[in-house]
Structures are given as structure tokens and as C-alpha cells.
Amino acid sequence: MTPRNESCTEHLLSVPGIMRVPTPRLEMFVLRDFLDDGECAALVERIDRDRRPSTIADANGDHYFRTSETCDLPMQEPGIVALDEKLSCLSGIDRQFGEPIQGQRYEPGQEFKSHTDYFDPHGVDFQRFCNVSGQRTWTFMVYLNNVEAGGATRFKVIDKTIQPERGKLVCWNNRRPDGSVNPATLHHAMKVRKGLKYVITKWYRERPWM
């Protein structure tokens, strides 16, 4: 059987409890309670252990564009393997097409300004990031805690704001039906005003991860 490198609306809508965001501009879904409290707490602890300043692919001169911290989760650890398998089952995408899972931590005042997850085909580093594994296809993101204030994710083009909620998963296709990148996926990880915010993110690629 050929490994699947693609998710689809039909597969995702077969998942109990999942909801499609009502917009014709992109494929986007929300699933509450994808992770339970214990799974979220373990990931928060793991992120705190190895966090580092976050980076962006193409520098734009704005040193405050992304001010969060990132943790590259160790894909050989049993708990992370189990999480990766759970995401693969949900998405329908074979694990070999996934990047390593990342965790992100936001303190009060930290944010990631409006951006897309795909790599800009005209960006200076496009070939470096996409030459082997291709473009990013789907994004799967899970909130790990309830934020005291702020920290929502705003999709400006479709006028949709998603509030952080422990265990809630949000996923979207970064491309249009014709396979071109979709600017309507532009989103802003808004500033945390009080407390901390933790998320994990899983990106899938067109070809197997290097």
C-alpha cells in the first residue's frame, strides 16, 4: 500500500466530534479534547525543559515579529512517538511525511504576528527549506492549557478567532484546491495578556521528511 501523504475533508469529517469551520476560503477544522489533561500537562513540562527562542524562515527585519519560545520535541521518546501516531491517525497522513513536532511557549506580551505556515515560493530561503521534502501541506495545532487572558489565534482573512482551550486541536490545509499556497491561511498568534500559553504544532510535507 502506498503511504498517504494527504489528508482530506472526507477523512477528517469521519472523526467523531470534529467540526469544519464554515468558510469557502480554506479547509479548516476544530476538535475539542483531542488531548486529555494528563497528556497536556506532560507536554507542558517537556516544553519547559528544552525551550529556546523561536525563529522565522525569512527574516523581515522585525525583531518582535515572533517573540515566543520553541521546543523541538524528541521524536524518539515513547510519549512523543505515541502523540505522533495519534496525529497521523487523525490526519490520515503517514508519519514519514511529518516534520518533528514542535512545542511553543508564550509569556505575557509575546506573540507571533500575522504569518502563513507555508514557505513563500518567492522567499530567499524557499529552496533551502523545500528542496528535499517539498512544501508544507497541512498544519495540526493543539492548545495545551487554558490561558488566563489573550493568546487567541486570529485568522484575519476569514474573520475567525479561535480561543485557546486545553486539549483543543485546530487543523487546516495550507493550499488551495489546485495545490497552490493559500494566503487565506494567514493567522496571528495574538499576545498573551495574562498567564502563559502552550501549544504543539505538527506540519506535514509533500514528500517524506529528510
Image (cartoon, rainbow, N blue to C red):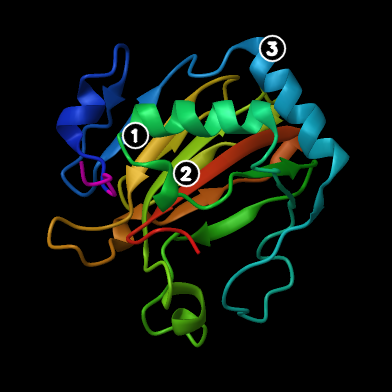
Q: CA distance from mark 1 to mark 3?
A: 22 Å
The residue indicated by pointer 3 is 38
The residue indicated by pointer 2 is 154
User: Is most of the magenta stretch helix, strand or loop?
Assistant: loop
Which residue is rendered at x = 30% and y = 46% of the image? 158
Tell me the element at label 2: strand
Question: Label 1: few (<14), some or many (≥20) within 10 Å?
Answer: many
The residue indicated by pointer 1 is 91
Tell me where residue 40 sits by quadrant: top right
Mark 1 or 2, closer to the camera: 1
Q: Earlier in the sequence, mark 3 or mark 2?
A: 3
Q: CA distance from mark 3 to mark 2?
A: 27 Å
Q: Earlier in the sequence, mark 1 or mark 3?
A: 3
Image coordinates for residue 161, horizontal then vertical, percent:
44, 36
Which residue is rendered at x = 74% and y = 72% of the image? 63
- Left or right: 13, with 166 as reference point: left
In the depicted structure, whether residue 15 falls above or below residue 159: above
Tell me the element at label 3: helix
